[in-house]
Image (cartoon, rainbow, N blue to C red):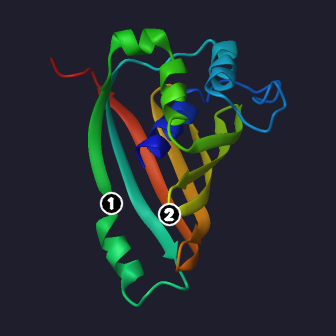
Amino acid sequence: MKRLVVLASVCALVAACSDDAPADADGDGEVSAAEMAAEVEKADIKPQAGEYSASSELVSIDIPGAPEGMADMMKGAMKSQDNKFCITQEQADKGFEEMAKESQQGDCTVKSFEVDGGDIDAVMSCSAAGQGEMSITLDGSGTATTMEMEVTMEGKLPQIGDAKMVMRTTQKRIGDCPA
């Protein structure tokens, strides 16, 4: 889940740029951290340092083959979550490359990454040993200080079958980082 929040943050905070060329510059079907960073660098936009409020909520969950009560259990575990985080001036000065690299650690691959006039669309695929593979679609908008993103995760869960979950996440700069 952290990987999704990081990718959503990267996408949202670069939303003011426009996309003149596809992020998959080498045409290999995957968007590398370097290709994401190049898209961000073209826009010459950096996140604004400060404290941010972030919230996420589970919008819907559909797991037709799940044992009775499993969806309700997951809803309870993933109910609305709020937290705060800071982007230091040093992190803001570095831009988004490190965040982009972090979003691609583990078993996730970014398939597409498009930013156009504040609108963000990205698709990634993540897998975990014994837990199946999920396609994750990010659709939202943002600025250097705000973000609204809908995250849709779809795939097959081992021994259960098809699963679809939709989450909504928002971030907003609320002031300077506490001393």
The residue indicated by pointer 1 is: 80
Q: Residue at x 53, y 48 (%)?
A: 149
Residue farthest bottom in this picture: 68
Q: The disc labelled 2 sits on which kind of residue?
A: Gln
Whole-percent x, y for residue 29 in the image: 79, 39
- In the picture provided, is 134 more to the left or to the right than 94? right
Residue 131's tag is 2
The correct choice, above or below, for 57 with respect to 66 in the image is above
Answer with the quarter of the image where residue 90 lies: top left
Q: Nearer the viewer, residue 116 or 71?
A: 71
Q: CA distance from mark 2 to mark 1?
A: 24 Å
Whole-percent x, y for residue 31 in the image: 70, 33
Answer with the quarter of the image where residue 15 lies: top right
Q: Residue at x 48, y 56 (%)?
A: 168
Residue 143 visible (yes or no): no
Whole-percent x, y for residue 46 in the image: 52, 16
Q: Residue at x 55, y 85 (%)?
A: 64
Tell me the SS state at disc 2: loop
